[in-house]
Image (spheres, rainbow, N blue to C red):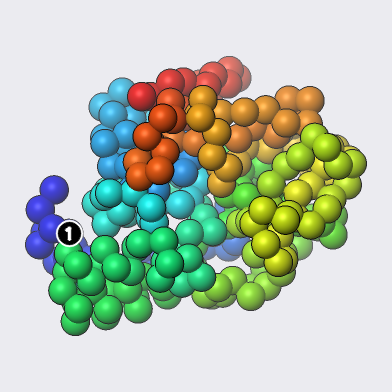
Amino acid sequence: MDILTIREFLKEHIDKLYSEFSAYEPLLRITTNKAVVIGDLHGDVNTLLRIIERFPPDNWMYIMLGDYVDRGEHQIETLYLALRLFLEHKAVLLRGNHESPLTNYEYGFYIELLRKFGPYDGDSIYDRLKELFSQMPVSAILNDKYFLVHGGLPINNISIDNIAKLPKPDEIPNNEVTFQLLWNDPSDDVKYYEPNIIRGPGTYVFGPALTESFLNSSGLKMIIRGHEYTPQGYKWNHGGKVLTVFSSRAGPYSDTRPHVVVIDNDSLNIIDVS
């Protein structure tokens, strides 16, 4: 992918992208018979290209769980391709915790923009991308069965209606519920929740009691999320009620076997795309 083409694409389309993302509520409702749910990519454009080849976007709806940038070798290219899929094939792009200035200055995305676009264009494009990230939806309900989110459940037993009304734009984000939706992790070692000492202040691990309560109150079957590195590319928590999918082997994840979740009518399959 030519970096000059990507730069011009972003300059030309950033206003349209911002407008379209800003029209979305924080919670999307999606109905489709054929969906591919893609976990963290972190600059792994090659895995995304393999997914496109195996599951053509003309035939499948893509739902991407966030973390397109930071850490990997081709962050700009990965984000560019995801945004093209959004514009041309109505792919759903949820926000991850790495679509934020909280991480982009430390984990590589901002530096990659400066290095590949030059300091002037890199800085100005990043300012616009920060605004774009702040308008991305943070969750989706798929086929009235699956709750899709990057991180996990907030600890205060929030409802679907509350999530749909979360404020945006929210750049960091500063809203604690939005922050936890992007940052929290499931745990089988707690019942309700505990502070997440690995990820730091404001983040929590949530237990099966919170999952059961949320799913029961919302009439849903399962949570599908990303956010958490797992070498085999997926893992189950909470008695099969929470599924984590990880789709990158870029950067520090070279030993991963990236997977996606494929929804084909009433069947759910976890597919190796390495």
Residue bearing the label numbered 1: 6
Query: In this orientation, which residue lies closer to the viewer: 192 or 147?
Result: 192
Q: Quadrant of the C terminus?
A: top left
Where is residue 153? Give x, y as percent.
73, 50
In the figure, 25 relative to 172: above or below? Answer: above
The residue depicted at 48 percent of the width and 40 percent of the height is 39
Q: Indicate left or right for 113 with 185 as reference.
A: left
State whether residue 13 appears in this view: no
Position of residue 195 in the picture relative to residue 3 (left or right): right
**Which quarter of the picture shows residue 119?**
bottom left
Q: Residue at x 35, y 62 (%)?
A: 108
Q: Amino acid type of disc 1? A: Ile
Please determine whether, in this image, residue 273 is positioned above or below residue 173.
Answer: above
| Image height of 81 relative to 158, above or below | above
Which residue is found at the position 38% from the left and 24% from the top?
Answer: 273
| Secondary element at image label 1 | helix
Image quadrant where residue 167 sits: bottom right
Q: Tell which of 103 and 6 is nearer to you.
A: 103
Drawn side of residue 211 relative to residue 181, left or right: right
- Give the number of callouts: 1
Q: From the top left corner, tell me how far across and down residue 184 is, in percent.
A: 68, 52
Q: Is residue 201 visible?
A: yes
Write the residue at 67% across / 28% down. Answer: 236
Image coordinates for residue 69, horizontal then vertical, percent: 38, 55
Please state the horizontal and vertical placement of residue 8, each as a whole percent of the image: 14, 66
* Mark 1 neighbour density, 10 Å: few (under 14) some (14–19) many (20 or more): some
Residue in the foreground of this view, choosing between 212 and 190: 190
